[in-house]
Amino acid sequence: MARIVMKFGGTSMAGMERIRNVAARVKYVVEQGNEVAVVVSAMAGETDRLVNFCREASALYDPAEYDVVVAAGEQITSGLLAMTLKAMGVEARSWLGWQLPIRTVETHAKARISEIETDALLAAMTSGQVAVIPGFQGMMEDGRISTLGRGGSDTSAVAVAAAVKADRCDIYTDVDGVYTTDPRIVSRARKLGMVTYEEMLELASVGSKVLQTRSVALAMKERVRVQVLSSFEAPTQNDIPGTLIVSEDEIEDSSMERQLITGIAHDKNEAKIIVTRVPDKPGAVASIFGPLAEASINVDMIIQNDSKDNEETDVTFTVPRADLARSVDILEARKDAIGFRRIITDAEVAKISVVGVGMRSHAGVAALMFQTLAERGINIEAISTSEIKVSVLIDEDETELAVRVLHTAYGLDAEQTAA
Ligand code: ADP
Ligand code: ASP
Ligand code: MG
């Protein structure tokens, strides 16, 4: 017997037929003698629909009310799954974020889980009742409902698994594991049997949305055993392995020869800003990035171009696309203080990243990336690196081509195409 948290994403919960399929899978795991909690997402497309209502209601909507609206999608699916389980003869009940409660802190719309009360949850689970928990939602210190940021149900699942000390947290989604790149873009992407927490964290943070970045960070910190699986395989084929997220020593022991690069990710959610003819003197760059930081805008890639006459320079950087207009407003309002000539923006860019712990001990990873893109005539607009990642910024139209040629160049292509 094991204690298992099962999480089902939006595509897996989209409609009653799929919910019945999920219930059948949960029933199968319960009948194997396991204690089960299930975390569910809203039906695919539902959260987008609710977000659009908020935007229509007011351009400057109150984030606390936004949370009231968007948390509703998960409330519906948790109730429907509990009902369906009961109809199949499985003891179950829903536990909403505020009922457990799942306590959260900081900001509405991107709240952080601080604590999950487990008394009721554990009492239910140990008595054989399946606890169905809506993902994505929690409760602020003042009792108001909160949400965890888009894709947050993964984080809910890992947090519940950590809180109940689950043996496993199984993330069921619409692909059967973590691949070397998004299998919807590269048909020759290869499924990874295992991936380290560190690599998964880096892959998620540069755009592999198969897991929310914060869920991986939490799993790494709390040592939760996370597995990514398909919800569309029949329950009896439970032995079809997904991808296990493991610590580095586990992977070292089990594979003699590691790939240099684990995966390639793309992200179309950034936009480029060029601030031209900034005075080339101490404090100039601080006067640009200080106000952006104060407005909680995350600047990612940065290049300060070489100053031609040693008096002025161009500064290029990226911000989340959603923050582009606000970033420009902030900088324009400080034009005189910063002393730039003009601001040029480009939202049609994509960030392509190659990730792998093998990079630490091998030179030439970045060079191969630049050379491969150059051979295809793809221009690199910015570069950033970390110990286990190289990212480049390119024209958005070239995203698919870039990911595909890099996948081949790093020897990641599968013999057969992904299903
Ligand atoms: P869910 O609704 O189950 O949370 P998501 O849509 O959030 O599912 O995440 C699953 C999707 O992640 C897949 O359909 C796939 O297109 C995408 N994805 C991106 N990168 C990868 C990758 N490296 N491996 C697997 N899937 C990936
Ligand atoms: N329903 C939420 C979203 O679409 C949370 C999730 O599915 O993880 O972002
Ligand atoms: Mg998701």
Image (spheres, rainbow, N blue to C red):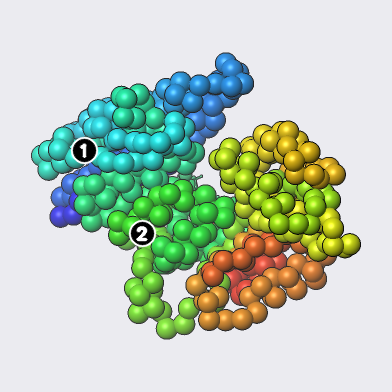
* Residue drawn at x 48%, y 78% as measured from the top left: 258
Residue 211 numbered tag: none
Tell which circle, 2 or 1, labels the residue nearer the N-terminal end: 1
Contact check, label 2 and label 1, Cβ < 8 Å: no
Residue 305 drawn at (x, y percent) = 79, 60
Residue 1 drawn at (x, y percent) = 15, 55
Compared to residue 83, the image places residue 341 above or below, namely: below
Name the residue at the top extreme: 57
* Residue drawn at x 23%, y 32% as measured from the top left: 100
Q: Residue type at mark 2?
A: Met
Residue 220 numbered tag: 2
Q: Is residue 140 left or right of residue 87?
A: right
Q: CB at mark 2 closer than 8 A to ligand 1?
A: no
In front of the other: 328 or 323: 328
* Residue drawn at x 15%, y 38% as measured from the top left: 119
Q: Residues within 10 Å of mark 1 (few under 14, many from 20)?
A: some
In front of the other: 292 or 135: 292
In front of the other: 98 or 12: 98
Name the residue at the bottom extreme: 256
* Residue drawn at x 39%, y 30% as measured from the top left: 146
Residue to which mark 1 is pinned? 117
